[in-house]
Image (cartoon, coloured by chain):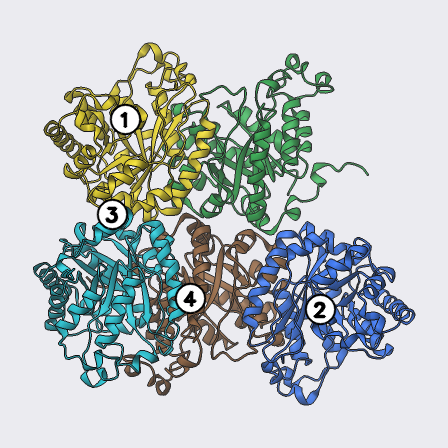
Chain colours: A cyan, B yellow, C green, D brown, E blue
Amino acid sequence: MEIKSLTEQKSLLATLSPGKRARLRRLLFEFGPGNGTLMLLPIDQGIEHGPRDFFPNPASKDPEYQFRLAAEAGYSAIACQIGLATKYYPDYAGQVPLILKVNGKTDIPPSDEALSTTNASVEDAVRLGADAVGYTLYVGSPRQGEDLHQLRQVREDCDRYGMPLIIWSYPRGRDIERKGGQSSFYAIDYAARLAMEMGADVVKLNFPKLDPEKAKDSPAPYNELEVGSEEAVRQIVESAGRSLVVLSGGSKTDDETVLSHTRTIMEAGGSGVIFGRNVWQREWGEALEIIEQIKETLLSSVRRIP
Amino acid sequence: MEIKSLTEQKSLLATLSPGKRARLRRLLFEFGPGNGTLMLLPIDQGIEHGPRDFFPNPASKDPEYQFRLAAEAGYSAIACQIGLATKYYPDYAGQVPLILKVNGKTDIPPSDEALSTTNASVEDAVRLGADAVGYTLYVGSPRQGEDLHQLRQVREDCDRYGMPLIIWSYPRGRDIERKGGQSSFYAIDYAARLAMEMGADVVKLNFPKLDPEKAKDSPAPYNELEVGSEEAVRQIVESAGRSLVVLSGGSKTDDETVLSHTRTIMEAGGSGVIFGRNVWQREWGEALEIIEQIKETLLSSVRRIP
Amino acid sequence: MEIKSLTEQKSLLATLSPGKRARLRRLLFEFGPGNGTLMLLPIDQGIEHGPRDFFPNPASKDPEYQFRLAAEAGYSAIACQIGLATKYYPDYAGQVPLILKVNGKTDIPPSDEALSTTNASVEDAVRLGADAVGYTLYVGSPRQGEDLHQLRQVREDCDRYGMPLIIWSYPRGRDIERKGGQSSFYAIDYAARLAMEMGADVVKLNFPKLDPEKAKDSPAPYNELEVGSEEAVRQIVESAGRSLVVLSGGSKTDDETVLSHTRTIMEAGGSGVIFGRNVWQREWGEALEIIEQIKETLLSSVRRIP
Amino acid sequence: MEIKSLTEQKSLLATLSPGKRARLRRLLFEFGPGNGTLMLLPIDQGIEHGPRDFFPNPASKDPEYQFRLAAEAGYSAIACQIGLATKYYPDYAGQVPLILKVNGKTDIPPSDEALSTTNASVEDAVRLGADAVGYTLYVGSPRQGEDLHQLRQVREDCDRYGMPLIIWSYPRGRDIERKGGQSSFYAIDYAARLAMEMGADVVKLNFPKLDPEKAKDSPAPYNELEVGSEEAVRQIVESAGRSLVVLSGGSKTDDETVLSHTRTIMEAGGSGVIFGRNVWQREWGEALEIIEQIKETLLSSVRRIP
Amino acid sequence: MEIKSLTEQKSLLATLSPGKRARLRRLLFEFGPGNGTLMLLPIDQGIEHGPRDFFPNPASKDPEYQFRLAAEAGYSAIACQIGLATKYYPDYAGQVPLILKVNGKTDIPPSDEALSTTNASVEDAVRLGADAVGYTLYVGSPRQGEDLHQLRQVREDCDRYGMPLIIWSYPRGRDIERKGGQSSFYAIDYAARLAMEMGADVVKLNFPKLDPEKAKDSPAPYNELEVGSEEAVRQIVESAGRSLVVLSGGSKTDDETVLSHTRTIMEAGGSGVIFGRNVWQREWGEALEIIEQIKETLLSSVRRIP
């Protein structure tokens, strides 16, 4: 048996229960750019980093900004915590799908032993009419045992209610720092596989930052691999198997990088992107422009229709 | 204070919880003819009447027929029982919204003391990714006490999960027969109000069949009213208040009647139609034709956008 | 020990748990005419009788009519079923207290074996911000066993959540008809005591209609008593003990009767009235006028401050 | 899209479920100064600091003092723990709304790793007839994970029972001390946003104490901002979005400061104040005087009616 | 408003639910010295200190000794853990009321981070026919968060079952030692208030041991107060508000001290004493003698009848 290329992989949707399929299909085909792609707008930085992220574009401080952007620019879905879902989503209910993030934390304490506890439930997501649930998993954290156990409940509830599970799979904590760092190929590759193994329908991953010097601390054979970013992303997507992969953007960068990362993830067999600050730290008009370009890039680089 | 005309009534969507709003909005605006209308396809006749309804168009015996019709002809939703939802809906999950009927019965015993017990739950509907739940209430049946009590659980679960509740509100049983019959203005007017009072988001009603002779047995003032069908429908829709009204069709009739009923319900401030046999007892091409005409009639007669 | 007159009775509020006290005090002192009186507006006729009650004043068919009346005319509370509470009360939430009726039925079947099953829960009432729960008890019905058992759950939940319990205590069914009828002194006196014994905080009773001929069928000594209406009401209120009594009005009658009944119940030590059709079957201006007169009568006839 | 000023923001009440709306409306309009303002009286210092806070005004040691003050001086609500709510509130039930604080701790242990565990439930609040629930969240504490998870249950129960949630959002613990301190603009701005994201209907915040030297340790851009107190408060209120903001007072200060802080929070779009020691550490007559001045200041500085 | 003296305070019994009132009244009036006093016999030293406490009077090792003493000498109640309640109380059931202690610990580990976990439930207490429940709270311990959270369940169950709650309120742990010690006025005053705020119906406190040198480490104003024992006790009782206070005795001391402490607590408005070793470390006859003297002292010093 030969390993199938990702573009030949069995459709994820075909393996999902009807509820998960109905909901995920909405994101992939009915809303957003469509054709099996995901263009997601995250607005959880207010809890993860605090209001400091809103200073570059003061309008972005009002959650209306992101909700209106998601609805009007045609996103596949918007991802947020329970407070925004309760107080801002209702005005856009049904106009853009909702991903309810069910855990989160501030970045005030250090992240050596990171753990993001749940502040909402899958039942909250059902009640609010969400089409997916988001969970942040800190891969390799000293507290990963608690994390995986907590995820179990979320995953079981997702199975029970037919709710797609999107895992924000982030290597984190003091131990991964000693093994090449949280942005290494090793770390992100591991994060992709772990999320898939834990039941993710979609995995959200960071773009790897390859640093040959730090990579030497990674376990073999990662310490000796000489792969470029594109190849690394390709392998990472492969590690996620039938789970779909979306790439997250991190802090604001130039348009070129945004679009090239988008192209890279799609050509690697990924399903889309989840860019926050790179989009809503721009003024309305500029935001719409980059969104349009992201959308075009997504659609023109599709390799795998789930 | 003057009574507001229905077209001026407060938007139903504005009063709904976010989950109900997100889900119902899909039916009203994202799928089907849109602009706040409902074109629903019921396929529960196999349990309510048995396979005899499929003989006029043998293709209709395969539930694929109705599911494919609903998806391809652009219905707002398809309504069925748990078995079809489990075995046929998955192929169409996300392509057309699902209404899970949670009760049903055969027509083998007489309906003097009609009661339709639940065979599925709102949680089933959530799990399957349905966007609404359907419940048949037999208004005025000697067993209405059991019925209203059973409906309570369904309604509470709908509230809990943010699931829209559609009540098939049917006058039935020996007592209503003594008071003008189940198709009288009195009976259907009462059914509209009762469904609304019990928490229906959408009420499914039959078109009244006015029979002046039988109407004399209805309580005052119905026994003396001289109203035509259109006026009766207008008043019935008014009795449903903020609950949306869809008209059901009953057994197959001529195109003229189908379209004229559609026009009547819309002009009375209703939200749409739920025609089954009138549609799928036709062959594929003919079915598509009448659907197209229904759709046009719906859209051209909209009086109230919820 | 001498029996205390009702006006000397221990305060009901002093015996209530804090939650019941806080909520009931709102109705008695913070909203409505105040000074310990209750002026309640019922709008459950749409389910109990159907839309026929709305014909005398078509504006009354829109539930907005009653809600706006309750809020603007300064009622102690409005009483309705779950559907109106969900779809119409939110616009008036906090402006007029809500009494959620948790059971109800249509009058299509005969009432020989009346039983009104629950269609909502005390938890629904809590969730909606209601200040009391209403329950219809059919005293003496052949199905009273089911009725009392069903009431048990409602009463226990009221105790658990600190929710005042108002019992619509109505003699009903074929057996009471054989013993003097549902409007006899015997029947209503029994209804008052039963409601109090079952845990009512407030009892809603009909005004007795004394018919010496029918009274002969009542058990001794009722079959031989020669009491006038006022004395009967006085004794009935006494039978309710520390439970407060409100008088219901029934079908529309002349102003004189409305006001004289109001005076009678208050002078008997009762706490107020719950008139529906007598109020909202009038046009807006006329309704406000009779309400003003009821209010004055209530306040000028107070004998007992709970 | 331009950011809307807070005074143009969508009404909070319009987004709330009926139960939350009914209850919160009582505090904002039916009790207290009204017109959408909140004047809250906290009496939880006995647990948070111990009896030492009562020495300046010995009468304040008897909880009757604060309850009578709240009722007679016309407060929007009184906030206390379960013991006072059980033993002192009943005498005032319905006369002044109750906010049940459901967590608390003594200040005997250091607060490096502060966590305030729950000692009461939302169901307790329902049972006692409370109109809101209070929860203290220690933003940025090393134990914030436990805190946010614990808050989840409280928030879910508030959603379930229609109970408004007021978050005492306090930056606390060793890590925030290293980033500018618990009274910095950075810390309080973050606390405002976090509370809103966690589902607060009302956020209670401390007045920031700007210390340019310590602010240098805050993350960018806070380490370089040059904003005065009023501007900082304005931005903080903005960070709370649709959640209403009340300012807490802390230890007793001069009248001038009390009133100027009141003015500042109102002009920034906040909804009111929650001053404890600044009020009840005064003798009865003096307390009434400052309350009167606070009330006038609140009403004359209203910018936003929720 | 003047603060009322404790002897003028509102009756505690009047604020209690019927079940709590019925049970507590047995202790205060039907058993023991009566007239609203509490003479309690604790026999939990076997778990708190081990058998070493029984050596001074070997007969005391047999729990029969304490149970018989409690019953025959006319105690208000006996307090013990689940094992004694199960194996020894049955012979005395109904002859002397039972207080079931639901938590406890050995003194083998140090008490720097004291926490006493529950080993029995309020439901156990109901099952055994107990008339109150006892809970030890370690005020100010680093683990107070767990303690208060654990107490929540006990208190809620007491509310649910109408069971009086007696809190053994003991300052404890390394942090209180740094602030004047567990026997300081500051510590015990705080303990009194905290127990009341957490819902105690009765608070058990230690007699303060005033040490001017250590008191300097207490927070202001305790570090500067010059109060004698009697004044301290008076203020401590005041801090407990409507919760009744009983004084515990600690290790065996001379008769003079026993009786003078008894007099002091009663004259301060307390409700009684709970002396263990001071009583049952004496031989039967001697025990009866001191009990008689305690009883007389209690009755002759009553200042407040609850």
Disc 4 target residue: D148
Q: Label 1: chain?
A: B
Q: Label 2: chain?
A: E
Residue drawn 52% across and 54% down?
D123
Rendered image: mark on residue C282: none
In this rendering, would C58 be left or right of D99?
left
Front residue (pair B34, D264): B34
Disc 2 target residue: E204
**Disc 2 crowd, CA 10 A, few/some/many (<14, 14-19, 20+):** many
The residues tagged by marks 1 and 2 sit, at their Cα atoms, a distance apart of 72 Å
Disc 1 marks a residue whose amino acid type is Arg
The residues tagged by marks 2 and 3 sit, at their Cα atoms, a distance apart of 61 Å
* Residue at disc 2, secondary structure: strand
Rendered image: mark on residue A22: 3
In this rendering, would E17 be left or right of B63?
right
Q: Are marks 3 and 1 in contact (CB under 8 Å)?
A: no
Q: Position of residue D35 (x, y in %)?
A: 42, 56
Front residue (pair A275, D77): A275
The residues tagged by marks 1 and 4 sit, at their Cα atoms, a distance apart of 52 Å
* Vertical placement of residue C249 versus B128, above or below: above
Rendered image: mark on residue B234: 1
Task: Tell me the quadrant of the picture where the N terminus of chain B can be found.
Answer: top left
